[in-house]
Image (cartoon, rainbow, N blue to C red):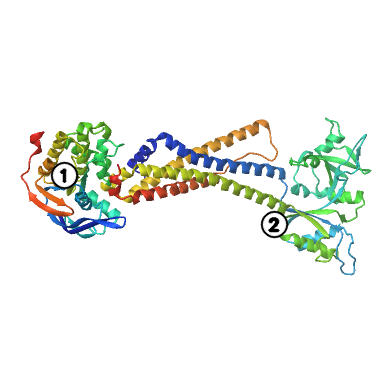
Amino acid sequence: MIEINNLHKSYKMGSNSLHVLKGLNFSIKEGELVAIMGSSGSGKSTLLNILGMLDEADSGEYTLDGVPIKNLNETKAAKYRNKFLGFIFQSFNLINYKSAMENVALPLYYQKVPRKQREEKAIKYLSQVGLKEWAHHLPNELSGGQKQRVAIARAMAAEPKVLLADEPTGALDSKTSYEVMDLIQNINDQGNTILVVTHEEDIAHMCKRIVHLKDGVIVEDKTVDQVRASQYV
Amino acid sequence: MFNKDRWKEILEVLTSNWFRTVLTAFGVFWGIFILIVLLSAGKGLENGIMKDFGDIATNTMFMWSRATTKAHKGLPKGRSFLFKTEDVSSIKEQVPNLRFISPRNQLGGFGDANNVVRGLRTGAFNVYGDYPEIIKQDPMSITQGRFLNYSDIEEKRKIAVIGDGVKTGLYDKDEDVLGTYIKIQGVNFMVVGVYKKKSNGGDGEEGQKQIFVPFTSFSQAFNRGNDVGWMAITAKDGTSITSIKNQIMDVVKENHKVHPEDQRAVGHFDLYEQFNRVQSLFGALRFVAYFVGILVLLSGVIGVSNIMLIVVKERTKEIGIRRALGEDPWSIKIQILMESIFLTIISGMAGISFGALVIYLINALLDMNGPVDMFANPSVSLGVVIAALLILIVSGLLAGFIPAQSAIKVKPIEALRTE
């Protein structure tokens, strides 16, 4: 599903440049649930941004579902993001003045799906994350865990190839964290490919594979026995 | 463009901070209001002054003879001459595109002694010997009886058409004037008509104190032979009198053996040129109105642009989210542009409406208090309103352009980092 080859990225900080990613190679197959771990500054967010086409690598190859991702203009990148990827952020990033349902329907709106279908689909995904009765509430009327579940429903709405989660539990207490991870595991069980960036050991172990980043290189790539989050809920 | 979701969003954004939106809108509102009011005030002045011009045929020149200043064909300079009735026919023959040529003679004038007597009453009035066409060049309305006609000219009838002011001076209030006689420099003329002139300018009163008699009777009664004091010449529509006046003057110069280069032998007053000068004054006024109005509007537009920039800044994160979710940058740009155009047009419409209301009130006030000198019926034409709307759309686009550009310049990743 995801194929990266010798990926390099450096940032310019004034006169000196910071080499963040130093030639990464790995691939993710369909249906995998991968955790990317590393301390801050290890380059995990940069990697995620490149995978999410929010940022561009300096060199190296990146293929997503057989499509080489290279030299995209903004319009094309937006189209690919919409079609291939679903984002889950640490700070939820819901749009404040739109209701939960409208937030979930947003990616479909960009696909020019008609309003009625959009709303039906949004309700369907909201009920999947157990928030059907909250559909018409604004984000600030929801708790942190609920917001993240709305965000997950939104990421799912466009039926993307890959879900990218950037510290999805970073702003949540452990109980809600497990609830969210349980949801992510369920989505993965349905066959979706998910990539989770985290620095929490227990969250990482709820994935099926852990990729350890340190100073821009992969130091460890191992499959683990998945810990089901449902047992803590 | 006509997308329900987009409009919903525009309204959501603009109503999320009412006070700011209204303040911003006020700049544009005020600009377009000033533009409309200035233009209509200019129009009011124009209407007022045009009213003073009255219905006078503006494509007209007056021409009279003076002393020559150049010797020519053995004749000395400083020679006086008079136009003759033959000049009229030769001008008619030689100059095309003329509508009326009226030779005129005149008695009396400003500061002259009393020259008209009726019974015990006397008065000093201007007496003109005229052809019937003069009523088309210097319009007047006949309130009683009739004006001169060609039978009067041919039969040299001693009849007179008097002005309203003459009637007041020589008659009692309810006296019947038609058929009575007045004595002009000792010669009796029968009054057959009374006229009133519309012009309400500076010499409005003077205009009512004139007496018109047939040209031929005038010449006979006052021993003018075939002399012509001066001429009023009107060109046909489509030909300006200014363009053919030299041709006309050349004809009379030729007839009277005046040196063709002698500029001062024939005096003239070109009404058309004067009229055009006034017209160009209005053009200048209109320019000033547009200039000031558009500058005020511009400051309003800059205000809108400023606020849109702030809105974009505030929504940086939201824009980042939308782009991460896959919104086309163009769609974001159009959204910002439409917000800006919508805001400008709405506030501009309010300004136009308010301006129209003020104009309506001024008109109502003018109607109530009677006419004012040099100001009448201020108004703006539909064309101006449409122009104002176009200006608004363009300025809305301009106001939104920079903010929209800055909105799509934001990299989604940077936008998402903004907390």
Q: Is A199 positioned to the left or the right of B164 in the image?
A: left
Q: Is A111 positioned to the left or the right of B297 in the image?
A: left
Instruction: Name, please, the residue furthest toward the bottom.
Output: B73
Q: Residue at x 65, y 34 (%)?
A: B366
Q: Residue at x 52, y 37 (%)?
A: B353
Helix, strand or loop at label 2? It is loop
Judging from the image, mark 2 belongs to the subunit labelled B
Judging from the image, mark 1 belongs to the subunit labelled A
Q: Is residue A1 visible?
A: no
**Mark 2 surroundings within 10 Å by alpha-carbon count, few (fewer than 14), some (14 through 19), many (20 or more):** some
Q: Is residue A12 above or below residue B50?
A: below
Helix, strand or loop at label 1? It is loop
Residue A88: image location, x then y, percent: 21, 43
Residue B212: image location, x then y, percent: 83, 45
Q: Give the spatial CA distance, label 1 vs label 2.
A: 91 Å
Mark 1 residue type: His
Q: Is residue B179 visible?
A: yes
Marks 1 and 2: CB-CB under 8 Å?
no
Q: Report whether mark 1 lies on the same chain as mark 2.
A: no
The residue labelled by disc 1 is A199
Image quarter where the C terminus of chain B lies is top left
Residue A91: image location, x then y, percent: 24, 40
The numbered mark at residue B240 is 2
- Give the quadrant of residue A151: top left
Mark 2 residue type: Ser
Q: Is B384 positioned to the left or the right of A30 in the image?
A: right
Residue B19: image location, x then y, percent: 43, 34
